[in-house]
Image (cartoon, rainbow, N blue to C red):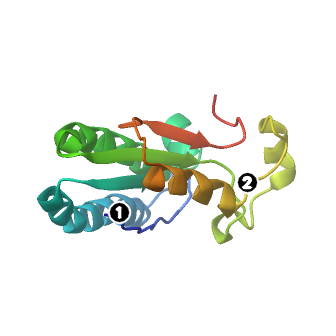
């Protein structure tokens, strides 16, 4: 059983200047979205005793970034929630993993200063959405799957 849903927003600001609305918007979208979508598909997966869940976190959820306290908190929260869920449902043959993309060429990264970020990435390039899709596809379709409860970084070495 395969389902896909991805949602995430940023409202970057230093914590000292961050508004409650910026905090709430990011946590609500990123964490409540996981809860709402995952809970809605989980019952059918439990019923048939199989499924694959791949949560999309972020390199910021693994290492934290200045100006992204809300985003980093929400994305690391997804990692913790997914690992806990993996322990809950693994015995029912439901495989749960996390992908943590880094700098990927999307609307979300459009205005970022790539000239300052690229030197931090050992592969020296920004990733493509296809780089993420390939890993998600592998996690969802590989027949012989023994990867469970793991975080797979797709970041060109940004987070090692």
Up the image or down, 12 lies above or below 117; here it is below
Q: Which residue is found at the position 19% from the left and 44% from the top?
A: 89
16 sits to left or right of 102: left
State the mark number for residue 89.
Answer: none
Which residue is more in the foreground, 65 or 94?
Answer: 94
Percent across and percent down for residue 124 are 85, 42
Secondary structure under the numbered disc 2 in the rendered image? loop
Residue 16: % across, % down: 49, 48
* Occupied quadrant, residue 28: bottom left
Q: Is any atom of residue 35 visible in this view?
A: yes
Of residue 20 and residue 145, the one placed in the foreground of this image is 145
Q: Residue at x 39, y 67 (%)?
A: 25
Mark nearer the viewer, 1 or 2: 2
- Proximity of marks 1 and 2: CB atoms separated by less than 8 Å: no
Give the mark nearer the N terminus: 1 vs 2. 1
Residue at 67% in and 61% down: 130
Quickly name the residue at label 1: 24
Task: Describe residue 46's horizontal placement relative to residue 67 as left or right.
Answer: left
Q: Residue 12, percent across and down?
A: 56, 58
Task: Reply above or below: 25 against 58.
Answer: below
| Residue drawn where x is 63% and y is 66% of the image | 108
Disc 2: which residue? 127
């Amino acid at each position: 059983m395969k389902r896909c849903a991805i949602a995430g927003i940023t409202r970057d600001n230093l914590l000292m200047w961050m508004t409650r609305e910026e905090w709430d918007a990011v946590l609500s979208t990123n964490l409540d979205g996981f809860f709402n979508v995952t809970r809605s598909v989980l019952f059918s997966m439990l019923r048939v005793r199989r499924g694959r869940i791949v949560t999309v976190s972020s390199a910021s959820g693994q290492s934290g970034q200045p100006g992204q306290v809300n985003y980093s908190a929400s994305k690391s929260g997804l990692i913790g929630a997914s690992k806990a869920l993996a322990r809950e449902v693994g015995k029912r043959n439901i495989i749960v993993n996390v992908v943590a993309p880094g700098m990927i060429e999307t609307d979300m990264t459009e205005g970022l200063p790539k000239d300052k970020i690229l030197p931090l990435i050992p592969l020296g390039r920004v990733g493509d959405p296809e780089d993420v899709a390939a890993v998600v596809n592998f996690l969802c379709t590989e027949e012989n799957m023994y990867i469970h409860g793991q975080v797979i970084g797709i970041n060109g070495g940004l987070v090692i």
